[in-house]
Image: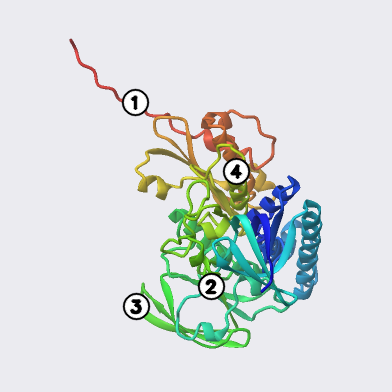
Amino acid sequence: MPDIERYENLVIGNGTAGKYLAWTMAKAGRRTAIVERKYLGGACPNIACLPSKNLIYSARVASLARRGAEFGLEMDSLRINMEGVQRRKREMVEEQHQLHLKLNKASGADLIMGEGRFIAPKIIDVALDGGGTRQICGDRVFLNLGSRERMPDAPGLAAARPMTHIEALDLDRLPAHLIVIGGGYSGLELSQAFRRFGSQVTIIEEGVRLANREDPDIGEALLDLFHDEGIEVLLESEVRKVEGRSGQQVKLQVYSKNTRAERVIEGSDILVATGRRANTEGIGLELTGVELNDHGYIKVNERLQTTAPDIWAMGDCAGSPQFTHIAIDDFHVVYDSLNGRDRSTRNRLTPFCLYTDPEMARVGRNESEARRDGVEYRLVKMPMSDVLRTVTVSEPRGFLKMLIGMRSDEILGFTAFGFEASELMAAVQTAMIGRLPYTSLRDAIFTHPTAAEGLNALLGRVEERKARTTSSSKI
């Protein structure tokens, strides 16, 4: 039996929240260990955010090159070299890997590469990558376990060995016909990218629209965009059966709930993008007193404490919104709480962006959520073509819209679908954090011509707010 090594802080998972917590604690002189089974730095710099945006930008360059004549450029031919696309991405990933090695060493945290499993409430047995085992005990334990792609249970799908975003982001070849199951974020982003590289693409989505948590106008705008780019989209459709092997030849039997008819779709590759599930299975959490909810995520309170003493959970596995920027905030919540500062996940303002081209970005409520919650609002909406910056770059597609309180000037939510949508959202988010009225943006002086200048035009169209009605009685 190996000796049990004791640390003040044991961080399981080297993703965004885990690494920042470990580095910060170690720099403060606290003996800290990080256990990571595969990806130094977690998913974001290796297999998710940064690699995907790298590949998506290469696809955007290809799209712009095809539009060269529109900008006065003349080219005889255009050929996509997927090996070159991957070379640029892998160089970036390797730079990030070396940076993480440097930062971890500088922090003083002990990095242990291997797979850990609990054998007691705060003790894990680690099967080391290089062979052998170590048993690690933490006075405090922090779970940063991440999540993985959820595989639908359609007959034959698992046997077909479909890709997730991980494999799709590492392809040195171009799929002849990529069939994407799921109309969520990663599915939409990669569908457009591979179509722009030259693949035939079909999306199969069970919901009534793409990005089904967004308002119908976003779903319609995305559908129009994909149709214009030659992507086939099958809504209200489900996969009933799969035959063949992804990467070679596949045949999918698809049922349409709308027409109540079945059709067969043949392709070369399958990409599954139907949502995620937490990495909480098979690691002995039942020995810790840490409870899970009905969806397999770890139960936490507003300070990310689990149901077990001296054990916290952060990031995807804690049911936090699955964004790197939220994982960073999870780190701050835990670290600040441990140091006596009042910080929690309560009332977080969560921004997010879908990196299609153009982008879709939102912060705060959309119309569907406001109606669901019984929140009265004023709506102001404007086409992106009214933003003069989009005229200069020939990117007029999309729209801006904002929800404003019916009887106040509070900004309730903002959605942008169009050129530089994420940058526009950041300006609105800053105003919302500062609790500024929409008039502060309406009357601000923004540089001309910029996308932000569109906020002046948008908010100049807001209807006057309704006065509160009061009752009075005569004495």
**Answer yes or no: do the residues labelled 4 and 2 have beta carbons within 8 Å?**
no
Disc 4 to disc 3: CB gap under 8 Å? no
Residue 338: assigned label: 4
Q: Are marks 1 and 4 in contact (CB under 8 Å)?
A: no
Separation (CA) of disc 1 from disc 4:
44 Å
**Mark 3, residue position:** 260
Mark nearer the viewer, 1 or 4: 4
- Left or right of residue 2: residue 456: left
420 or 168, nearer to the observer: 168
Q: Residue at x 52, y 50 (%)?
A: 304
Marker count (numbered): 4
Q: Which mark is residue 468?
A: 1
Amino acid type for the residue under numbered disc 2: Gly
Q: Nearer the viewer, residue 6 or 246?
A: 6
Q: Tell me the SS state at disc 2.
A: loop
Three-letter code for the amino acid on which mark 1 is drawn: Arg
Cα–Cα gap, marks 4 and 3: 56 Å
Q: Are marks 3 and 2 in contact (CB under 8 Å)?
A: no
Which of the two discs, 3 and 2, sits closer to the camera?
2
Q: Earlier in the sequence, mark 4 or mark 2?
A: 2
Mark 1 / mark 3, whichever is N-terminal: 3
Q: Which mark is residue 115?
A: none
Q: Earlier in the sequence, mark 1 or mark 4?
A: 4
Residue at label 2? Answer: 282
Residue located 64% across and 49% down the image:
420
Instruction: Identify which amino acid the numbered label 4 is placed on.
Output: Leu
For marks 4 and 3, the one nearer the N-term is: 3
Pair 2/1: label in front? 2
Residue 311, percent across and down? 55, 55
